[in-house]
């Protein structure tokens, strides 16, 4: 029969993924806190990343381990985007619900900018890991455990760096921004 459908060839690194699809599905469910809809989207996006080359298997680990990391990172990306969307929506809604709320004056905006700049300066004085953990927990509203997953470190290490970072930041704030 002419015109029969032919299978589209797949890249070598993606061809073996079907062998552990069930375990990938289980891992996606775990990464999405057993939310089936979210896990389906994460797994599909991870497969697409593997197919279109955004995620490349370089042979440093087994194919299964590599793909599980792709799933974990994809789930973390979706979680962060969702948090940012919900935060923005709640801020927008709170402003819409309070019609009597004062509109920020240029002076108030400038003061807020100065405070934020001062805090950024202090955060830059922390170690990169402490800074990353504090950012994920305070600005992205992740738990310390979630932040550990994003950074690929153990929860115990994350807790230690988080506590030390907070303590150091507290000391710098108490001393007027100084201290090492």
Image (spheres, rainbow, N blue to C red):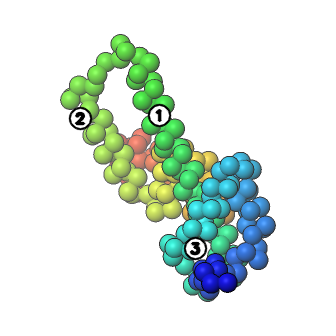
Viewer-nearest residue: 121 or 144? 144
Q: How many marks?
A: 3
Q: Earlier in the sequence, mark 1 or mark 2?
A: 1
Q: Which residue is mark 1?
A: 89
Viewer-nearest residue: 36 or 148? 36
Percent x, y for residue 149? Answer: 63, 60
Percent x, y for residue 146? Answer: 63, 53
* Label 1 SS: helix
Could you tell me if the residues under marks 1 and 3 are in contact, i.e. CB atoms within 8 Å? Answer: no
Q: Is residue 114 above or below residue 45?
A: above
Q: Identify the residue at image location x=77%, y=61%.
A: 26
Q: Which residue is mark 2?
A: 110
- Please identify the quadrant where the N terminus is shown: bottom right
Left-right relation of 112 to 165: left
Q: Which residue is mark 3?
A: 50
Q: Between tags 3 and 2, which lies in front?
A: 3
* Label 3 SS: helix
Viewer-nearest residue: 176 or 51? 51
The Cα–Cα distance between marks 1 and 3, rounded to whole angstroms, is: 32 Å
Q: Is residue 179 above or below residue 26?
A: above
* Label 2 SS: helix
Q: Residues within 10 Å of mark 2 (few under 14, many from 20)?
A: few
Is any atom of residue 58 visible in this view? yes
Is any atom of residue 138 visible in this view? no
The Cα–Cα distance between marks 3 and 2, rounded to whole angstroms, is: 45 Å
Identify the image quadrant of residue 159. bottom right
Q: Identify the residue at image location x=58%, y=73%.
A: 50
The Cα–Cα distance between marks 1 and 2, rounded to whole angstroms, is: 24 Å
Q: Earlier in the sequence, mark 1 or mark 3?
A: 3
Could you tell me if the residues under marks 3 and 2 are in contact, i.e. CB atoms within 8 Å? Answer: no
Could you tell me if the residues under marks 1 and 2 are in contact, i.e. CB atoms within 8 Å? Answer: no
Residue lying furthest front: 1
């Amino acid at each position: 029969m002419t015109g029969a459908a032919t299978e589209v060839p797949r890249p070598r690194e993606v061809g073996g993924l079907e062998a552990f699809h069930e375990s990938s599905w289980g891992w996606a469910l775990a990464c999405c806190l057993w939310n089936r809809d979210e896990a389906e989207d994460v797994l599909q996006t991870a497969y697409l990343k593997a197919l279109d080359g955004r995620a490349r298997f370089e042979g440093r680990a087994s194919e299964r381990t590599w793909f599980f990391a792709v799933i974990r990172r994809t789930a973390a990306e979706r979680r962060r985007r969702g948090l940012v969307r919900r935060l923005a929506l709640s801020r927008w809604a709170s402003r819409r619900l309070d019609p009597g709320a004062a509109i920020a004056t240029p002076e108030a905006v400038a003061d807020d900018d100065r405070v934020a700049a001062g805090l950024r300066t202090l955060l830059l004085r922390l170690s990169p890991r402490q800074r990353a953990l504090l950012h994920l927990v305070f600005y992205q509203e992740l738990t310390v455990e979630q932040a550990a997953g994003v950074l690929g470190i153990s929860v115990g290490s994350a807790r230690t760096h988080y506590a030390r970072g907070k303590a150091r930041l507290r000391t710098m704030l108490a001393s007027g921004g100084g201290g090492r």
